[in-house]
Image (cartoon, coloured by chain):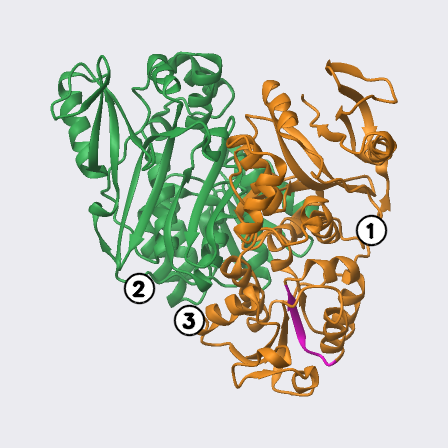
Chain colours: A green, B orange
Amino acid sequence: MKIALLGHGTVGRGVDDIIRARVPEVEVARILELPDRITDERMTSNFDDILNDASIELVVECMGGIEPAHTFIAAALKARKHVVTSNKAVVAAHFGEFAQLATENDVAFLVEAAVGGGIPWIASINKVRRIDEVSYFMGIMNGTTNYILESMRRERLDFNVALGRAQELGYAEADPSADIDGIDVANKTIISACVAFDVDCVRDFPVTGIRTITKRDIDFFSSRGLVVKLFGGGRSVDGRYAVTVEPVAIPYSAMEAAVPSNFNILSVEGMTVGPLKFYGQGAGSLPTGNAIVQDVIDVAHGRRQVYNFSRGLQYDPALIMSDFVIRATRCPVYGETWAPGVWRVRNLTAEKARALLEEIWEYDPTAFMAALPREV
Amino acid sequence: MKIALLGHGTVGRGVDDIIRARVPEVEVARILELPDRITDERMTSNFDDILNDASIELVVECMGGIEPAHTFIAAALKARKHVVTSNKAVVAAHFGEFAQLATENDVAFLVEAAVGGGIPWIASINKVRRIDEVSYFMGIMNGTTNYILESMRRERLDFNVALGRAQELGYAEADPSADIDGIDVANKTIISACVAFDVDCVRDFPVTGIRTITKRDIDFFSSRGLVVKLFGGGRSVDGRYAVTVEPVAIPYSAMEAAVPSNFNILSVEGMTVGPLKFYGQGAGSLPTGNAIVQDVIDVAHGRRQVYNFSRGLQYDPALIMSDFVIRATRCPVYGETWAPGVWRVRNLTAEKARALLEEIWEYDPTAFMAALPREV
């Protein structure tokens, strides 16, 4: 099978290397690159060379960003080419549109590499759903913030020092907002919710990152036997669902507390299979390239996952209620005092908690908030 | 698709319930049961009623034990019926024979439920192998011993008290030898090695269980920041492989140390995908039933995993070397003293370590030994 790559950065090169070394039945025939980066006779900077080449059966999009990725993916699907992508931003923004185009044109649209790197997460949710409905999913979906939080805790670094190290190691971008403000996790949460709950997930749910966490916050949580991790997740009950992205202070004994460095862990629960967890490299050239190539092999073997988001679930923020710990100069609602300047506010929805945090940020922009799991 | 169940115990009832509730394209048409347990018009105590029924395309074997399971599976494959089984003992004993019969008769032989209950472990190894060779696999594969070790550590119970509780909860059999002596883990290790390394795994490798562990041993390891878990695993390098089953004393910070109660965790590593871990319910009616039904659905969808064990890997015990901690009245080889009656012996193969333990058991049958991971 002949395929084309859109983009030849970290992920694209991983795909190219893996296919050349390990997958003889697939050939990377064309590669879209910027005019000043053409280094290979397969490369072109004109997308039409790929779109109009009838021998190309599948397009791998690994450019990142919304445009022109959105236009190229839609055009490829309309031209009856299968599409495999690792681009979480464009999938989160347009999953419903791409799924419909794939169905109308009888081709595959596959997104394994968009969440959890090499972890077989999307495939595993789809497998669970062959038998069970998914009651919840959740996980550590962003290796950069996990690396920052782990470095702060284990090496007692300040936030900015840990962020700087993540940037030096290539884990974080020069503008780290997408990671530290939870936007990357929000994109992965949308994609996971679409697959897990078979619904075109809402986009305006509460998203809180870790930008304001301090070494003192980490020390405070440690003194209570708690470890802060940035989680994305969702829950579905009785025809309703909700999703959220927020820091959660989990007990030391939880498996998620042991996730090191820039790794990811993702959990899903079905009624008969029970809780399952999946752990691995959430990013990187070869793990993400591996996930893309797995999708390509599935297409080559005639496997076709169809998404139609037809269950018609209603969004209901009341499904996700937690207690929250707030560190601020003062707390504008009633909360039990855990320490000077630290309150526990009970039983808020993620939406109410986010509104409360925004109210606090007006007078204390350094404030930090984390949810507590039910049992703490 | 019409299928038959051989056995209607815990697992068979789980399969029957899941298919009736969730899988309309599959019908459990016949069930093999003992004459005094026939309660349903689908039931028969004559296997020939199933073997000679041409409408039955697939047989689920969930009787357990070697015979008559071995005879029935071989007969079903020869009659060109697909076979799905959860019976680790019979698969470990006869995987090569069953794989060959399945290939010769162009039917599927699927074993997802034999290792890790509801965890998609066998499917995940096979998926990793579409791209990568497996460099190692390992894991906590037996929920009963994990429950015993966790109860001893968290509630400071004696071994026999923890074992009694496991028996009360239905986790352990009246004769617990298969669990506590590592035989169940050995069976799952053989099956995992066959799939991971594409080799008909040897059967005479070192197997050590947890029968002699005491509360004082647990306390000693805790004082060193270590948690004892029973592991099965294997490694492959350069056309060679080795497997072993033994207690391992891992650091508190390892994810495996956080595995609670009777859960399982399984790890596999491929060159491009990196390390992956899979966690879930390793036993039970619904999780194990779920894994069987996933295999049945794969067959119904025309997916066929073929095993031929043709890589011709050589068994080489030198591939797995560890340091070992031994608690005994005395140590017959040189070891660094860690505490009175506790020695660390460096750099033994699992085979040498097992031989040493057997030598010690001749004068101190209460002795306990655990491997240390490389970094401790």
Q: Position of residue A184 (x, y in %)?
A: 37, 35
Q: Give SS at disc 2.
A: loop
Which residue is tagged 2?
Answer: A310
Sequence-wise, the earlier of marks 1 and 3 is 3
Position of residue B176 in the picture relative to residue B282 (left or right): right
Q: Where the N terminus of chain B falls, by quadrant?
A: bottom right
Crowding at dot 2, Cα within 10 Å, few <14 / some 14-19 / many 20+, comes out as few
- B344 falls in the magenta region: no
Which residue is tagged 3?
Answer: B21
Marks 2 and 1 belong to one chain: no
Which of the two discs, 3 and 2, sits closer to the camera? 3
Which of the two discs, 2 and 1, sits closer to the camera? 1
The answer to whether any part of residue B257 appears in the image is yes
The answer to whether any part of residue A38 appears in the image is no
Q: State the residue at coordinates (48%, 26%).
A: A171
Q: Position of residue A166 (x, y in %)?
A: 47, 20
Gap in angstroms between the C-alphas marked 2 and 1: 50 Å
Amino acid residing under circle 2 = Ser
Q: State the residue at coordinates (18%, 21%).
A: A361
Position of residue A204 in the picture relative to residue A145 (left or right): left
The residue nearer to you, when weighing A371 against A2, is A371
Which residue is tagged 1?
Answer: B203
Gap in angstroms between the C-alphas marked 3 and 2: 21 Å
Q: Which residues are magenta?
A: B79-85
Crowding at dot 3, Cα within 10 Å, few <14 / some 14-19 / many 20+, comes out as few
Judge whether B371 appears above or below B60 on screen.
above
Determine the chain carrying the residue at label 3: B
